[in-house]
Image (cartoon, helix red, strand yellow):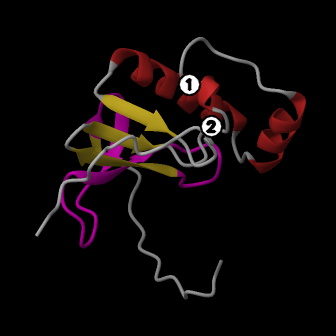
Amino acid sequence: MWAHSPAWETYSDEGEPWLGFESIRQLRDLPEDIFFVALPGHTLGHCGMVVNTSNGLLLDAGDAFFDPREVNGPKRQLGLPVRLFEAIVTTDKLLRVHNQNRLRELAASHPEVTVFAAHDPTWTWGGAQVRAHQ
């Protein structure tokens, strides 16, 4: 994980509102249509990343949820192994659950936004093409 010697960039979690979330824009060396949204709860400072594509907005929610059924469709209770893992790695359960609820509302009310997560085995780019920036 550390072999590539990452150079960390930090940002304040206070930013512009974006569809009910705080967005962190003006990311160093990135265009305006790529930005973070604050999703604390899984870990301190956890963020999702929004990318504007020719097919709409993509929101990679990172580890804000572990199963796509947690935010897509009716609220679903996960199986015991996933619930235990989620409980072990969560830094703030109330914030995590709050953000999952907000992500569920976002997915239901904004069809132009595709919400997915790092652990979603069903996610594919589905032809989404990220806009080229010069």
- Which residue is located at x 54 percent, y 32 percent? 99
Measured as percent of width and height from the top left, residue 6 is found at: 51, 82
Observer-nearest of 3 and 28: 3
| Magenta residue span | 17-46
Neighbour tally class for label 1: few under 14, some 14-19, many 20 plus, Cα within 10 Å? many
Q: Secondary structure at mark 2?
A: loop
Q: CA distance from mark 2 to mark 1?
A: 8 Å
Is any part of residue 43 visible from this angle? yes
Which disc, if any, is residue 71? 1
Amino acid type of the residue tagged 2 in the rendering: Phe
Name the residue rendered at 31%, 44% in the picture.
128
- Say which quarter of the image contains residue 98: top right
Report the quarter where the C terminus lies. Answer: bottom left
Residue 19 higher or lower than 89, as above or below: above
Q: In the rendered view, does 110 fall on the left or right side of 79? A: left
Q: Nearer the viewer, residue 95 or 130?
A: 130
Q: Which residue is mark 2?
A: 65
Image marks 2 and 1: residues in contact by CB distance under 8 Å: yes
